Amino acid sequence: MLASIFSKTRPINYVLLGGVLVLFYALHMLQDQSWLGSYTTIGLKVTLLLLLAGTLFLTGFITLKNTLTKTNSYALLLFLLFQVLFPSTLSNVNVIIANFFLLLALRRLISLQSLVTPKEKIFDASFWIFAAALFHFWCIIYIILVFISVVFHVSRDYRNWIIPFIAFFAVGIIYFMLGLMVGHEFFDHIIEELTPSFDFTYFENIYQNIALAIYAAIAALFVAPYVISIPNKPLNLQSSHKKILFSFFIGVGIYVLSANKNNSFLAFTFAPMAIMGANYLESQDNIWVREIAAALIAVIAVLIFVMQL
């Protein structure tokens, strides 16, 4: 059974998940085989696959390193299933890079709880967030999570409130230097994304619409119990779980505000959703509830994926 297989963090689980990612990535990419004739494009596709794998396993690292779940692989499994549910997340270059950077930022913000080198962690997180915004502009609102983290842990030192602005100028200088070297085209996609869009009629087929509806239902199933459970978590972990919750809503905000909307923008919610889902699964005392929930999500994700091939 699926839930039983991933109830532990065995090395074989990582191999299985990596293999499944490669399989679905290949199926998605091979719909159009024109890129196989270019070594440059092949190199780009392989790099994207490595970034997707990095994002997947970084989610697992954040989860286990900070004790956000018990020692299981549920978060990794759910993250992968969400990618399968929305195949466009496997090919949107800017979203893949931006999401990877946001996870690097989230890693630093959650580790801020230790109060070891807080200024470095605030700068690093802010830097990665502004770097992500270069690839997808509305990732910039993730900076809200930096200030929330400062409030939670190190609000008394005024310098901690200034550090994100220093990171902003650092990224800005690098960006403008690259823009001067490459040309004004380097700025075009940022300018196009500045205006928020609330147009949700972007679906190319009915299956994209169904996938979004299913994801919203899964979110309702995972988020509500998670919110209720936070006060019952160990005191030293409550702030970390609150950051996960805030990161989910910020991810939703990125999706809502983004121009030229498509389902791939939901990738910014995958990591927190996977962590909340893992908490939901491990909280179920009845093993059959865990098995049915995990299997149902897996079957639906695969069916939606196949229908869009």
Image (cartoon, rainbow, N blue to C red):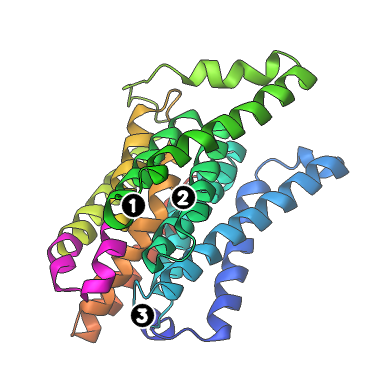
Disc 3 crowd, CA 10 A, few/some/many (<14, 14-19, 20+)? many
If you read the primary sequence from the N terminus, does the residue marked by circle 2 or circle 3 appear first?
3
Q: Position of residue 254 (x, y in %)?
A: 38, 35
Q: Is residue 48 magenta?
A: no
Quarter of the figure with the N terminus: bottom left
Residue 296 position (above or below residue 213): below
Residue 149's disc is: 1
Magenta segment, principal secondary structure? helix
Residue labelled with disc 3: 3
Query: Three-letter amino acid code at disc 3?
Result: Ala
Disc 2 target residue? 122
Residue drawn at x 47%, y 41% as measured from the top left: 163
In contact (CB < 8 Å): disc 1 and disc 2: yes
Residue 197 percent across, percent down from the top left: 36, 20
Give the alpha-carbon distance from disc 1 to disc 3, as whole Å: 33 Å
Residue in front for this viewpoint, 302 or 177: 177
Q: Is residue 32 left or right of residue 142?
A: right
